[in-house]
Each structure stands twice: as structure tokens, then as C-alpha cells.
Image (tube, helix red, strand yellow):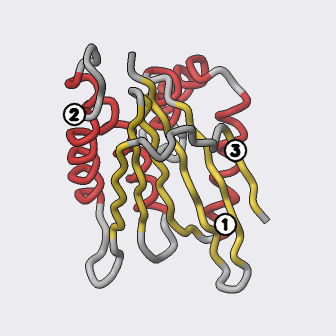
């Protein structure tokens, strides 16, 4: 069974410039440092694919920030296995899919968070969450990164959860897209 949240559709076609990276989980342990390095590399690579008139510094920053937020979540919450990254750029539309496996409990908690994030205005909810986090430094899992992407970067985000009952995991595919003018 597959459950989808947000906008999990991709529009870039075969003419798009693409890059696929598989972060192998074994024998090295994936860490947050891998996220920053990978995101910076992809931001630099795809910023150079933008058409004339697009601020490449802004594109590099936006792509890097978007990927870092989503990659950190994939690495932090993955159950086991690799993290697969697929990115493309066509006509100033950057799209990415990050895939990993999570345990069913993590999937359930994340789906509940997504339902809340997607049912409210991202700007209002972002302010509420910033205020709540400021008053309780120990709070976590508030979705601030995702809300910032939706509100400040106008990112289109979507998630697809597919249960694999044979091995007790859930395949999570996170789709994110940015359009540069």
C-alpha cells in the first residue's frame, strides 16, 4: 500500500540534466557531514545548469539548502540501508527525489507531522513553531526545516510511503522541486 502526501509528481523529462548518487550505508556509517558535502556538491553542479538570467549564487544556495534539509532527515531517520538521491534540472526547474527506508513507527509519526504541516498555512505555522522552539529548547521534530522550505523557498514538496511487509520497513520517497526565474 502506498500513501502520498503533498505534491509527489515530477515534471522534468528526458531532456533534463540528471545526476544520481547512492550513499552507501555499509561499511561506513552515514552522518550529517555527508549531507552537507553532498548538498553543496549538488547545489554547485545544478546551479551551473541554470539558464542565463538566473542568479547562480542564489540557485546554488537554494538547491544546497533544500537538499541538505531533506538529506539530513533521510540520514537521521533511516532504518537501515542506503540513501538514494536523484536530481534533475530542465528549463530552470530543479527536481529531486531522495529515497530511504524507515521503520513503521517513524513513518507513522512523520505522516502525522506531514498532515499537520500540509493542512495549515506554512508561514503562520512556521512562526508558531519558531516561538514554541524558542520557549522550549528541548523540543524537536517540529518540521521547521520543511516549513522554511515551503514558506521561504516556495519549494514544492511531496512524500510517498510504501510499506514492505516482508521485511517490516517502509520505503520513503521525498520529492522536492524549486523553480528559478
Above or below 123: residue 59: below
> Circle 2 is placed at which residue position?
48
x 29%, y 28%: residue = 50
Judge the density around disc 3: few (<14), some (14-19), many (≥20) Cα neighbours within 10 Å.
Answer: some
- The span from disc 1 to disc 3 (Cα, nearest Å) is 17 Å
Q: Nearer the viewer, residue 78 or 46?
A: 46
> Circle 3 is placed at which residue position?
5
x 23%, y 42%: residue = 45
Q: Quadrant of the C terminus?
A: top left
- Residue 71: image x %, image y %? 39, 53
Q: Quadrant of the N terminus?
A: bottom right
Q: Nearer the viewer, residue 135 or 123?
A: 123
Q: Earlier in the sequence, mark 1 or mark 3?
A: 3
Is 75 positioned to the left or the right of 106 in the image?
left
- Kindly indicate whether the residue at mark 3 contacts the one at mark 1 (C-beta within 8 angstroms): no
Q: Nearer the viewer, residue 32 or 62?
A: 62
Q: Nearer the viewer, residue 104 or 164?
A: 164
Above or below 36: residue 50: above
Q: Earlier in the sequence, mark 2 or mark 1?
A: 2
Q: Which mark is residue 67?
A: none
- Kindly indicate whether the residue at mark 2 contacts the one at mark 3 (C-beta within 8 angstroms): no
> Circle 1 is placed at which residue position?
105
Is 6 positioned to the left or the right of 66 in the image?
right
- Kindly indicate whether the residue at mark 1 contacts the one at mark 2 (C-beta within 8 angstroms): no
x 64%, y 69%: residue = 170
- Residue 169: image x %, image y %? 63, 75
Under circle 3, the secondary element is: strand
- Residue 40: image x %, image y %? 22, 44
Nearer the camera: disc 1 or disc 3: 3
Under circle 2, the secondary element is: loop
Amino acid at each position: 500500500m502506498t500513501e502520498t502526501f503533498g505534491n509527489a509528481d515530477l515534471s522534468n523529462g528526458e531532456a533534463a540534466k540528471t545526476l544520481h548518487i547512492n550513499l552507501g550505508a555499509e561499511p561506513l556509517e552515514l552522518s550529517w557531514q555527508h549531507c552537507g558535502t553532498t548538498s553543496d556538491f549538488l547545489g554547485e553542479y545544478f546551479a551551473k545548469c541554470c539558464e542565463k538570467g538566473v542568479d547562480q549564487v542564489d540557485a546554488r544556495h537554494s538547491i544546497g539548502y533544500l537538499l541538505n534539509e531533506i538529506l539530513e532527515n533521510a540520514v537521521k531517520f533511516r532504518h537501515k540501508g542506503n540513501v538514494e538521491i536523484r536530481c534533475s534540472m530542465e528549463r530552470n526547474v530543479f527536481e529531486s527525489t531522495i529515497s530511504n527506508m524507515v521503520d513503521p513507527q517513524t513513518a507513522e509519526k512523520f505522516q502525522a507531522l506531514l498532515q499537520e504541516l500540509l493542512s495549515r498555512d506554512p508561514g503562520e505555522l512556521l512562526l508558531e513553531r519558531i516561538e514554541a522552539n524558542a520557549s522550549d529548547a528541548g523540543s524537536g521534530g517540529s518540521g521547521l526545516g520543511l516549513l522554511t522550505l515551503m514558506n521561504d523557498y516556495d519549494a514544492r514538496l511531496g512524500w510517498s510511503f510504501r510499506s514492505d511487509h516482508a521485511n517490516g520497513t517502509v520505503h520513503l520517497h521525498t520529492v522536492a522541486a524549486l523553480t528559478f526565474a
